[in-house]
Amino acid sequence: MYPILKKEMLTPTICRMEVEAPRLARAAAPGQFLIVLPDEKGERIPLTISAYDPARGSVTIVTQKIGASTADIIAKEPGERFRDVVGPLGQASEFVAKPLEELRKERFIFIAGGVGTAPVYPQAQWLHEHGVPVEVIIGAKTRDLLIYKEEMTDVCDALHICTDDGSEGFHGMVTALLEKLVAEGRTYTQAVAIGPMIMMKFTTLTCKKLSLPCTVSLNTLMVDGTGMCGACRVSVGGKTRFACVDGPEFDGYEVDFDEAMRRQRQYMAEERETMERHECKIGRS
């Protein structure tokens, strides 16, 4: 059993929790994920690790309420426990294995969309702590949906805010802001995009136009998280890969985003039906 140490609602539908998991905290690396089982009858939910503290023996997860299972996770309070937390799973970010003398010659730009900002944080933090130049773009539809602004300021050389409606920061899409930064003379050697699939697709296209290598995280495709269900199959460079065991990070240039988005939509009807039953159950209780 894994106690919940802290809970904070970052927005009305996005929740941050710190969970006691000492062995996982000691082994975790940027880019990896874990699986949460809320209770004995719950569904296994893959969630990217957004922070890990080996000294405290805890990991932090950020969950967005999009269905019945994520609603069950968010409903728990500090002092309650998850039935199981398994990890770390997946491959660590590629830069972790690079020699530091080479890595410090790079200049990273992270493009974070919505809840995808949470998994950007440990990557930016790791690079910043190892002396690698890092800038971050955080994008959201409106200012009320922006998360991790204060935390990200401490782990990057420059933070750029972007909202679709112009309520804070740059008025427009993250892709337009990236082009603006490059046009102003900022230079980057590597982009990393994490967020909605459509955002990562168009960020990759923009990076191609700028001749900027781009890594994307396909964590939103994962269901079982172990490669057994096959739900996260995706074509990368013309070959079949599994986001949960081969990724979740891949070269954005090689990802078939249209296929990935079709796969992402395949369970939408079932998710809506389950959520409706879940809300009816809560209403009767």
Image (spheres, helix red, strand yellow):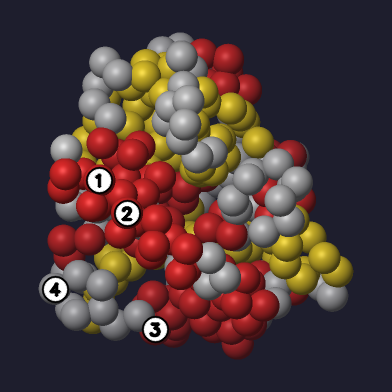
Which structural element holds mark 2? helix
Q: Looking at the rendered structure, which numbered label has been put on residue 281?
A: 1
Closer to the chain start, of discs 1 and 3, is 3
Q: Nearer the viewer, mark 3 or mark 2?
A: 2
Which residue is tagged 4? 167
**Disc 1 residue crowd, few under 14, some 14–19, many 20+, Cα 10 Å:** few
Q: Residue at x 60, y 77 (%)?
A: 262
Please tell me whether residue 97 is drawn above or below residue 243 in the rendered image: above
Which residue is tagged 2? 277
Q: Residue at x 29, y 82 (%)?
A: 172
Q: Position of residue 185 (x, y in %)?
A: 45, 77
Residue lying furthest front in this view?
A: 284
Q: Residue at x 47, y 63 (%)?
A: 270
Q: CA distance from mark 1 to mark 2?
A: 6 Å
- The three-letter amino acid code for the residue at tag 4 is Ser
Q: Nearer the viewer, mark 4 or mark 3?
A: 4
Q: Residue at x 51, y 51 (%)?
A: 133
Q: Quadrant of residue 285?
A: top left
**Disc 2 residue crowd, few under 14, some 14–19, many 20+, Cα 10 Å:** few
**Disc 3 residue crowd, few under 14, some 14–19, many 20+, Cα 10 Å:** some
